[in-house]
Image: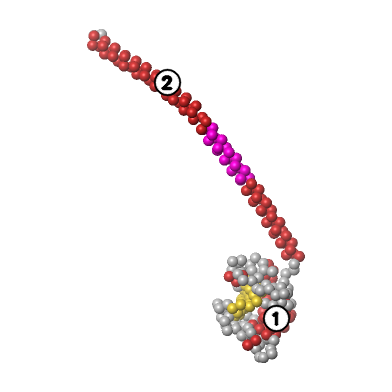
Amino acid sequence: MTDAEFANAEWWSWFWGEVEHWSFLLVIVFLAVEFAALKLGAPFKEQLDRTRSDRLATLTVQAETAKSEIAKANARTAEAELQLERLRKQVPPRQIDQHVLIDELKEAPKPTKIFLTWAATSPDAWYVAVQLATIFSAVQWTFEYGEPALPDSPYLHTPPGMSAAGSSGILILFPKGTKGLSFDDLKVGANIFGDKTTSFGALRGAFIKTLGISLTARLDETLLPGEFRIVIFPR
């Protein structure tokens, strides 16, 4: 080995020795930093873990409470429905004396058409509609079943008025220009509730005589002359 080669080998030996030395020192420094980070960060990590655990426990309690409240609400709803069904069974459906109603209507002028509308959620209302359809068929009054009225139907927005005897739950809608609405339409001294000279008067009088309580009638400008709509509300 020449002196130049010896010197070159000696330099490289020194260089890599320095690299090894400083690398070892860097490893020690990084280990020290890692150790310090673990020690210094541990309290914060523990605090975060406790917070997460506390929040999870709170959310779990809230979820269980919500489930319990929902279960109680469902139980109350079921009990209310059961009580309502029991009440429905105790209260008989509305029954119209068909013979009386037929007798009141058979000689009266016939309307152009009567539309039957009933509350879709009430079996009793449907039962009344079927009875009326039978009566109108018997007196040869033209009628048509309308669509069952859902709770948000405009026909059910304003229920019939109440009297001292209660409410029939039946509303008569009439078109503009209908005769038989007031005493002015009748001869002096005539009974507006027993008028059979107009289809409206006969229909109203028949309901009052059959059900024994007053009815409510309202204007419906969508109806054509001679048409009526009978709206049957839930009992």
Q: What residue type is labelled 1?
A: Ala
Q: Residue furthest right?
A: 90
- Residue at figure coordinates x 24%, y 9% from the top left: 3
Q: Name the residue under label 2.
A: 28
Query: Which percent across, then down, holds residue 101?
Result: 71, 80
Hey, which quadrant is residue 172 in on the image? bottom right
Magenta span main SS? helix
Query: Which percent across, then down, holds residue 69?
Result: 65, 50
Q: Is mark 1 on a helix, strand or loop?
A: helix
Q: Which amino acid does label 2 sit on?
A: Ile
Residue 67 higher or lower than 104, as above or below? above
Q: Residue furthest bottom?
A: 188
Inspect the magenta stretch and tell me whether residue 67 lies in it.
no
Residue 140 in view here:
no
Inspect the magenta stretch and tell me whether residue 48 lies in it.
yes
Q: Is residue 170 left or right of residue 154?
A: right
Residue 46 higher or lower than 13, as above or below? below
- Residue at figure coordinates x 65%, y 86% from the top left: 183
Q: Nearer the viewer, residue 208 or 29?
A: 29
Hey, which quadrant is residue 211 in on the image? bottom right
Residue 205 in view here:
yes
Q: Mark 1 points at which residue?
A: 206
Q: Residues within 10 Å of mark 1 (few under 14, many from 20)?
A: many
Residue 43 higher or lower than 137, as above or below? above
Q: Is mark 2 on a helix, strand or loop?
A: helix
- Highlighted range, magenta: 45-64
